[in-house]
Image (spheres, grey):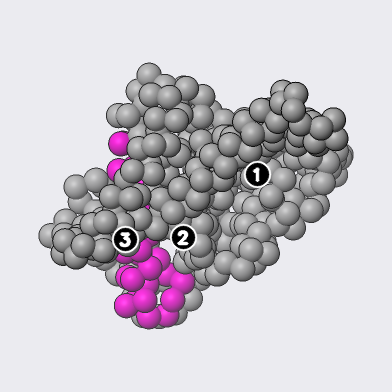
Amino acid sequence: MSLDEKLNRVVARHDELAHLMSAGDAGRDFARLAKEYAELGPVVRAIGELRKLRGDLAGAESLMKDSAAGADMRALAESEYFELKNRVPEMEKRVQLLLLPKDEADEKSAILEVRAGTGGEEAALFAADLFRMYQRYAESRGWRFQVMEMSDTGLGGFKEAIAEIAGAGVFARLKYESGVHRVQRVPVTEGSGRIHTSAATVAVLPEAEEVDIKIEDKDLRIDTFRSQGAGGQHVNTTDSAVRVTHLPSGLQVACQEEKSQHKNKAKAMKLLRSRLYEFERERRDSERAQTRRDQVGSGDRSERIRTYNFPQGRVTDHRINITLHKLDRVLDGDLDDLIEPLIAEDQAARLAELT
């Protein structure tokens, strides 16, 4: 199907939705139709702008060739023609991007999970650095960052840290962060100045609502235990910590950050829903793309996606072969120069699939 045929279908569907809603025939489907109509609005406006540019381009070309027009008029038309000739392809690309199938999870908030990998205490310290990096990035974008679970080493590092990041479009920007992050630096305890390599894993899950994932009570086993801190010290003396096991999948989550058992259970259920939702998304994506190359940001956690080299002050993203010499700023939450190219690469790959 040509681009123009796709554009005609979008405009026709937009008109059809407007008629259905205004005629009062939508009934219980009104909310769904209104949502689709609103989503198509920006696309239809962009199509209108593209068609106007194309019409202006054709008009300028016609005037350039019109021998009856004065020399000044033809010169003006020629100048306009070359300007429009550059703008039309740009607008066509913008329209194509708007036509790309949307990830239903993009507008959702997210659950961030950071875990120390190979490298002992140095890996745990790096995991803590990453966790703070994402916290600062969230703050810079006005998102709410709330710690859900944290297991520290007592020496400043994190074995595991989980947070909820709430806001518009959180998952759309952070979904490319899932994977193995590697660090190269000289540990504080290293007397000979030898560079060590360690790693941490990052998982970003779209936050699932109850309407996204239905969990039956019969499929759950809920255990309570005493919260514990670093070194096995009791945080409190009541059984406020909660462990929830989803029996059909075997998934297990635990929360102990809150003093209230009720609040810990609510957090555990939120985390469980998100993990089940992501599991289902990955299953569907795998079925749809069995023969397709993995996209950037697919979240394959077996791959090293990024290296943070402290001696050289650089960060390298291996998926798009980009290196930034501003390690301090990146760790302080300045991530857009890494995230924007990943989004652009993903869009380019998806556009290539449509052609």
Q: Main secondary structure of the magenta part?
A: helix
> Residue 246's spot in the image, x, y percent?
24, 54
Residue in the picture at 51% in, 57% down: 169
Q: Earlier in the sequence, mark 1 or mark 3?
A: 3
Calculate the distance from the C-alpha at mark 1 to the C-alpha at mark 3.
31 Å
Q: Determine which residue is flagged by label 3.
A: 34
Q: Amino acid at mark 2?
A: Ser
| Above or below for 140 versus 307 | below
Q: Secondary structure at mark 1?
A: helix
Residue in the picture at 64% in, 63% down: 141
Q: Secondary structure at mark 3?
A: helix
Q: In screen coordinates, is 57 left or right of 334?
A: left
Q: In screen coordinates, is 195 left or right of 218?
A: right
Task: Return the residue nearer the eye: 3 or 287.
Answer: 3
Q: Secondary structure at mark 2?
A: loop
Task: Return the residue nearer the eye: 279 or 81.
Answer: 81
Q: Residues within 10 Å of mark 2 (few under 14, many from 20)?
A: many
Is the Cβ of the residue at disc 2 closer than 8 Å to that at disc 1? Answer: no
Magenta residues, start to end: 255-284
Q: Determine which residue is flagged by label 2.
A: 109
Q: In screen coordinates, is 5 left or right of 181?
A: left
| Above or below for 303 versus 24 | above
Q: Residue furthest front?
A: 68
Res 340 label:
1
> Residue 12's spot in the image, x, y percent?
33, 43
